[in-house]
Image (cartoon, helix red, strand yellow):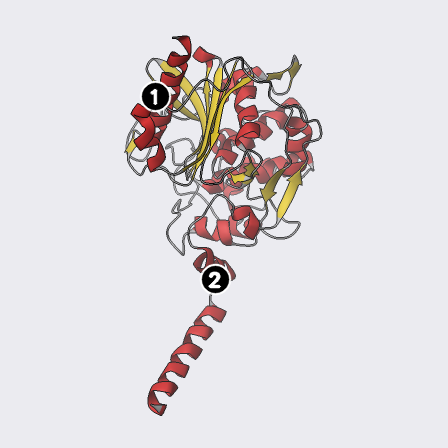
C-alpha cells in the first residue's frame, strides 16, 4: 500500500513538473482544448465602442419566413447559434439557437481577416499607405519577411509564401501558438518565406496578422481604434465589439478574434453590398472593394487548383450563376453578400463541414441554398 502511494506521489510530481515547464501557450491550449464562440472570455480584449447605434428597420415581411423543412436536418447538424437575413437594408429574418441571444457576443474567427482587409483599404484611402503594391519592408523592416520582395498585395491575396503551418489541431503548430500565446510580434518577427512571393496561394493566419502590424505602423493607431473610427462608429453598430489581444494592452489577434453579434456583423456585409457607402457617406473606396471581391484566377493553390474562390482576404462563392463574396470563420461563421437579392445573410455557429468542394466547406452551399429557398418563398 505504501509503495503504491509513493508511486502515485512520484507520478503526480512528474506531471506537475511537466506542466510547469511547458510553454504557457501550451498550458492554456490544454486547459481550453478547441476554440469556441465565447473564447473572448479567456483573453484580454480591446473595446470597440458603438458610438452611434442605429437599429435595423424591420422588413415589411419580417416574421413571415421560416427555415425550410427541406434544410432542417442539414442546418441543425452543424449546431447553429444564429441565422439572420437583411434585405433592402431591412431586417427580414432572424432566429437564435442554443440559448444564444441577439446581443450575445460571438467570435468571428477568420471573418476577422476580411475586416483587416477593410482596414488596409481605409489606410490607403487616408494616405497612410501608398497602394497595395507598397513593399512590406517599408513598414516592418525588422521582420524576417521584409528581407524578401513581398508586397501588401502578396499579403492581401495570401500569395506571400509565408513559412507558416496553418494547423489548428496540432499542439505545437505556429497557429496554436498565435491563438493561445502572449506575444504575436515575437512570434512573427523571425518567420520568413517558404515559396517565392506571388507564386502560389496558401492561406495562413500569420499573413493577416502581418497586415494588422502594417496598418498599426502606417496609421500610428491600434487597429481596434482605427476600426472604430473608420467603420464601427459610421455604420450604425448597436453594440460594442471586442477584439481579443495577445496580452493585456497588447496586439489584437487580428486574424481571428473580433467579437460581435449577427445584427452588427451583417453591417459589414451591407457595407460591401452598398459598394463602400453607408447612407450616402463613402466609408471606403468602391475600387478597393472591387479588388477585395474579385477572384485571383491567375494563381493556383498548393493542390494545383485555380484560385477562383478568393480575392483580398475575402472568399468568393460561384453558385447558381451568382458570384457571392463572403466572410468565413473556422466554426462556420459566415457573412454572405448576395447582390442579386440586395441581401446579406449571416450564419453563426459551433461547427462547419469538414468536406470541401474546391476549398469551399459544403455547409456553405447548405446555407446558400436555404437562403435562396427562403427568398423564393417570399415571392410566392
- Quarter holding the C terminus is top left
Spot occupied by residue 2 in the image (x, y as percentages of width and height):
36, 91
Image vertical order of residue 226 relative to residue 171, above or below: above
The answer to which of 193 and 265 lies nearer the viewer is 265
* Point 46% across, 17% down: residue: 64
| Badge 2: residue crowd in 10 Å (few <14, some 14–19, many ≥20) | some
What is the quadrant of residue 308 in the picture? top left
In this picture, residue 72 sits left or right of residue 264: left
The spot of residue 37 in percent (x, y) is 48, 43
Residue bearing the label numbered 1: 369
Which one is closest to the eye, mark 2 or mark 1? 1
Q: Residue furthest right?
A: 51
| Label 1: few (<14), some (14–19) or many (≥20) C-alpha neighbours in 10 Å | some
Q: Give SS at disc 2.
A: helix
Q: Earlier in the sequence, mark 2 or mark 1?
A: 2
Mark 2 → mark 1, Cα distance in angstroms: 42 Å
Which quadrant, please, contains the N terminus? bottom left
**Residue at x 38% of width, y 87% of height:** 6
Relative depth, front residue between 245 and 371: 371
- Residue 27's tag is 2
Measuring from the top left, give residue 182's x and y in whole percent: 56, 54
- Residue 84 appears in the figure: yes
Amino acid at each position: 500500500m505504501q509503495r503504491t502511494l509513493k508511486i502515485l506521489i512520484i507520478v503526480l510530481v512528474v506531471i506537475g513538473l511537466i506542466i510547469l515547464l511547458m510553454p504557457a501557450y501550451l498550458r492554456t491550449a490544454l486547459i481550453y482544448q478547441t476554440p469556441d464562440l465565447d473564447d473572448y472570455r479567456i483573453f484580454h480584449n480591446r473595446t470597440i465602442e458603438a458610438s452611434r447605434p442605429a437599429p435595423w428597420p424591420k422588413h415589411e415581411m419580417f416574421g413571415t419566413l421560416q427555415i425550410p423543412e427541406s434544410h432542417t436536418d442539414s442546418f441543425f447538424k452543424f449546431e447553429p447559434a444564429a441565422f439572420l437575413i437583411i434585405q433592402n437594408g431591412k431586417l427580414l429574418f432572424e432566429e437564435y439557437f442554443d440559448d444564444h441571444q441577439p446581443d450575445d457576443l460571438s467570435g468571428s474567427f477568420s471573418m476577422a481577416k476580411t475586416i483587416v482587409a477593410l482596414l488596409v483599404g481605409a489606410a490607403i484611402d487616408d494616405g497612410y499607405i501608398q497602394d497595395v503594391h507598397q513593399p512590406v519592408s517599408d513598414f516592418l523592416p525588422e521582420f524576417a519577411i521584409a528581407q524578401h520582395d513581398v508586397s501588401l498585395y502578396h499579403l492581401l491575396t495570401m500569395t506571400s509564401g509565408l513559412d507558416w503551418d496553418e494547423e489548428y489541431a496540432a499542439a505545437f503548430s505556429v497557429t496554436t501558438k498565435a491563438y493561445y500565446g502572449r506575444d504575436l510580434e515575437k512570434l512573427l518577427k523571425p518567420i520568413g518565406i517558404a515559396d517565392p512571393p506571388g507564386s502560389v496561394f496558401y492561406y495562413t493566419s500569420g499573413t493577416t496578422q502581418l497586415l494588422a502590424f502594417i496598418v498599426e505602423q502606417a496609421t500610428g493607431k491600434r487597429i481596434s481604434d482605427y476600426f472604430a473610427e473608420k467603420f464601427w462608429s459610421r455604420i450604425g453598430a448597436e453594440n460594442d465589439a471586442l477584439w481579443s489581444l495577445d496580452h493585456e494592452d497588447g496586439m489584437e489577434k487580428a486574424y481571428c478574434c473580433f467579437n460581435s453579434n449577427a445584427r452588427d456583423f451583417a453591417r459589414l456585409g451591407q457595407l460591401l453590398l452598398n459598394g463602400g457607402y453607408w447612407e450616402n457617406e463613402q466609408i471606403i473606396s468602391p475600387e478597393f472593394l472591387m479588388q477585395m471581391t474579385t477572384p485571383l484566377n491567375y494563381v493556383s493553390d498548393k493542390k494545383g487548383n485555380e484560385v477562383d474562390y478568393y480575392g483580398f482576404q475575402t472568399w468568393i462563392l460561384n453558385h447558381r450563376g451568382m458570384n457571392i463574396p463572403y466572410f468565413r470563420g473556422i466554426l462556420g461563421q459566415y457573412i454572405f453578400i448576395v447582390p442579386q437579392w440586395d441581401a446579406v445573410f449571416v450564419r453563426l455557429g459551433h461547427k462547419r463541414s469538414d468536406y470541401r468542394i474546391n476549398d469551399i466547406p459544403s455547409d456553405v452551399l447548405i446555407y446558400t441554398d436555404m437562403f435562396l429557398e427562403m427568398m423564393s418563398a417570399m415571392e410566392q
